[in-house]
Image: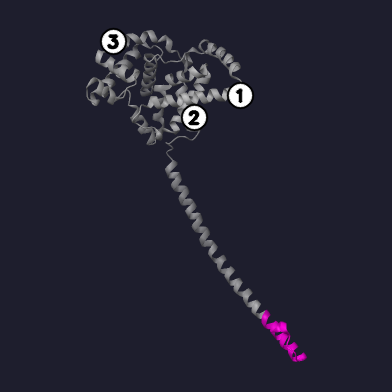
């Protein structure tokens, strides 16, 4: 299997396989860092806050309820942690100075070490054709599950197909996307 | 390694189709998170955790038992000493008593304190 379900990875983590947690970090790092970036306004702080988010999530993994989606839970932690970060920064009354400094740092990152960073905006135009090439039923499933954030149960009711079919089709869609992405992404 | 790559790729796909991606992300971000988890002792994997706990419990149990056993003779000695001290008290009383008797014989009047 190319990609395991979040629930399965969480189960592995809770049973003692800490290293499995890396899969969740890799899967959601981009979206969580971007959530933090919206609050911190600079990428270095965003990565620091996101790191704290993933640590908090790991520490509280046993309290996660599998009835909700892992990303939704992680997103809430990211928003709260970012707000705490902003509040602590305001307390220190350094907000404006630090933002200005870090905007300059942001600009330098891409120029200095481009190979150490993922630059996703370069891939946007390449990814759309991959989505368009997916069969309609798979594309619809990807939209419902990954973009509209519905659960398997909700998709099953909406499309009137069994949950098992939802799972297997999504699995097929993911595999197709990953395989095609590997062909276009020359960085990997 | 291959599995890692797939998750990272899928993460990028997810963020792009959701139009939810930052300008740059460090390629070693996930490694840093995992390093933090391991160095801060959050790791639930610690392969030696359970055996270490058992070994520590056994070690303390043995020390406690040894301490209890080695303390036992000291307690006995203490009890013995107390008894001797009591005996000494009795002897003292007898001596005191006899001195009272002597006083009584000499003066003919019994001292109230000797009663």
Cα separation, mark 1 vs mark 3, equals 51 Å
Residue A60 location (% of width, % of height): 43, 33
Q: Which mark is residue A92?
A: 1
Nearer-the-camera pick, B37 or A135: A135
What is the crowding at mark 3: few (fewer than 14 residues within 10 Å), some, or many (at least 20)? few
Asked if marks 2 and 1 fall on the same chain, the answer is no
User: Which residue: 39% across, 25% down?
Assistant: A72
B94 is within the stretch colored magenta: yes
Residue A22 location (% of width, % of height): 41, 27
User: Which residue: 58% across, 14% down?
Assistant: A100
Chain to which the residue tagged by mark 3 belongs:
A
The residue tagged 2 is B36
Q: Quadrant of the C terminus of chain A?
A: top left
Q: Are marks 3 and 2 in contact (CB under 8 Å)?
A: no
User: Which residue: 71% across, 83% down?
Assistant: B114
Chain to which the residue tagged by mark 1 belongs:
A
Residue B40 located left or right of residue B9: right
Q: Quadrant of the N terminus of chain A?
A: top left
The residue tagged 3 is A133
């Amino acid at each position: 299997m190319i990609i395991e379900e979040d629930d399965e990875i969480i189960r592995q983590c809770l049973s003692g396989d800490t290293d499995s947690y890396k899969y969740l970090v890799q899967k959601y790092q981009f979206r969580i860092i971007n959530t933090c970036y919206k609050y911190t306004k600079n990428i270095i702080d965003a990565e620091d806050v996101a790191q704290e988010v993933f640590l908090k999530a790991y520490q509280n993994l046993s309290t996660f309820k599998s009835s909700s989606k892992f990303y939704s839970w992680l997103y809430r932690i990211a928003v709260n942690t970012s707000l705490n970060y902003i509040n602590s920064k305001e307390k220190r009354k350094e907000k404006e100075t630090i933002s200005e400094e870090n905007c300059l740092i942001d600009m330098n990152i891409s120029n200095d070490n481009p190979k150490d960073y993922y630059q996703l905006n370069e891939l946007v135009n390449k990814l759309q054709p991959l989505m368009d090439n997916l069969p309609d039923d798979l594309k619809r499933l990807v939209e419902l599950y990954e973009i509209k954030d519905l659960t398997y149960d909700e998709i099953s009711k909406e499309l009137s197909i069994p949950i098992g079919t939802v799972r297997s089709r999504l699995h097929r869609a993911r595999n197709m996307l990953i395989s095609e992405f590997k062909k276009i992404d020359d960085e990997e | 390694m291959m599995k890692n790559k797939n998750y990272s790729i899928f993460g990028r796909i997810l963020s792009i189709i959701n139009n939810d991606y930052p300008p740059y992300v460090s390629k070693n971000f996930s490694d840093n998170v995992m390093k933090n988890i391991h160095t801060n002792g959050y790791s639930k994997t610690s392969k030696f955790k359970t055996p270490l706990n058992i070994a520590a419990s056994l070690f303390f149990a043995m020390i406690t038992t040894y301490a209890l056993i080695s303390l036992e003779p000291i307690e006995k000695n203490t009890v013995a000493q107390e008894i001797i001290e009591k005996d000494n008290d009795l002897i003292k009383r007898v001596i005191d008593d006899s001195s009272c008797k002597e006083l009584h014989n000499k003066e003919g009047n019994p001292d109230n304190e000797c009663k």
